[in-house]
Amino acid sequence: MESQRWSPGGGPRRRVPRRSPVAPDGRARPPHPVGPTAWVLPGPEEADEDGVVGIGADLAPTTLVDAYRRGIFPWPHPGMPLPWFSPDPRAVVATDGVRMSRSLRRTLRRSGWSTTVDAAFVDVVAGCGAARPDGTWITASMARAYERLHELGWAHSLEVWAGDRLVGGLYGVQSGGVFTGESMFHRVPDASKVAMLDLATRLGEAGGALFDVQVATPHLTSMGAVEVPRDDYLAVLEAVRDDRVRLWTREEPVARLARTAG
C-alpha cells in the first residue's frame, strides 16, 4: 500500500458525496454482484519471482473484483501494459495489530480529529494520487476504475477530518473479511497513521479477518505489518472472501483509539 503526502494547501472541505454506498443502518452497503470477468488471469501460483501474474486485461469492475478475490491486484508501471501482481511474501496487518508510538497516542488524545468511512471517496483517491516529484501510479483511468468499484460497494475510503477539513485518509478494496489497502495520504503529521489504525479497528469490529497492505515497506513494518507466505494469505482470503463484513460509516472521534492502541 502506497503512502504519500499532499502539497501544502487548504484541502477539500467536507461534502456529501454524489453517490455513496451507505445503507440505512449506517453500515457500508453490501457489494453489488458484478458477474463473471471476460478475462482469464493466471493464478497467483503462476507469478514470477517479482510477483507478476500477468500483463494486460482491463480495469472493468468484473476484472478487478475477480482479481482481488483471488489475491491479485493491478500496479501500473510507466511504459508498459498493465501488470497484475500477487507478491510472495504478502504484507498484512492483524486487525488488532497496528503498532502505535507514544507520539501517535498523544495525537489521538489531543488532536480532536474524527474519522468517517465512504464520506469522501473521490477526494481520498485524489489525495493519494496528488502529483509528487517521482510521480504516482494512480492514473486518471485507475481513479475512475476504483470510483466505479466504490459506487458498486466493493471499494471503500477512510477519511480523517480536522473539523470540516480532510487531512488524511486511505482507500482500498474489500473482499468479505479481507480489506486490501491501495494507498493512503496525509496533509498533516500522523493523519495517515490514524487512518490505518482506524480502518483496522473498524474492520475488526465488523468481524473482518485481515488488513492486507500488499508489499512491506519500512513505514508499514513500523506500523505493525508482517510478511506471511502467499499461500497462507490466500488460504485466509479464500476462507473469508464471502463473509458478510460491513464497515460502520458513522463519524467517530479518534480519541477512542488511544484506549485500544498497542
Image: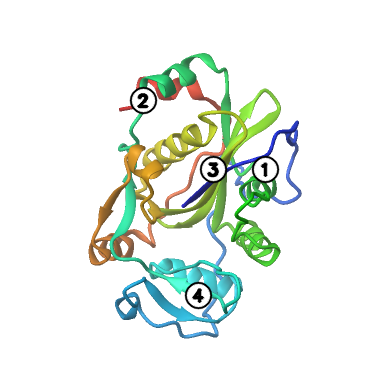
Q: Disc 3 and disc 1: Cα gap in Å?
A: 15 Å
- Identify residue for label 3: 27
- Identify residue for label 2: 101
Residue at x 37%, y 20% (from the top left corner): 102
Q: Is residue 158 visible?
A: no
Q: Disc 4 and disc 2: Cα gap in Å?
A: 36 Å
Going from N to C along the chain, the mark reached first, 4 or 2, is: 4
- Identify residue for label 1: 120
Comparing 44 with 150, the one in front is 44
In this picture, residue 162 sits left or right of residue 50: right
Q: Look at the picture and state if 103 lies above or below 220.
A: above
- Identify residue for label 4: 83
Q: Look at the picture and state if 81 lies above or below 222.
A: below
Q: Secondary structure at mark 1?
A: loop
Dot 2 amino acid type: Ser
Residue at x 56%, y 56% (from the top left corner): 155
Going from N to C along the chain, the mark reached first, 2 or 1, is: 2
Q: Look at the picture and state if 254 lies above or below 139.
A: above
Tell me if mark 1 has few (under 14), some (14-19) or many (20+) residues whose alpha carbon lies within 10 angstroms of its own: many
Dot 1 amino acid type: Ala
Comparing 34 with 169, the one in front is 169
Going from N to C along the chain, the mark reached first, 3 or 2, is: 3
- Pair 3/1: label in front: 1
Q: Look at the picture and state if 73 lies above or below 3.
A: below
In this picture, residue 146 sits left or right of residue 54: right
Q: Disc 2 and disc 1: Cα gap in Å?
A: 28 Å
Residue at x 74%, y 40% (from the top left corner): 16
- Pair 2/1: label in front: 2
Comparing 131 with 64, the one in front is 131
Quarter occupied by the C terminus? top left
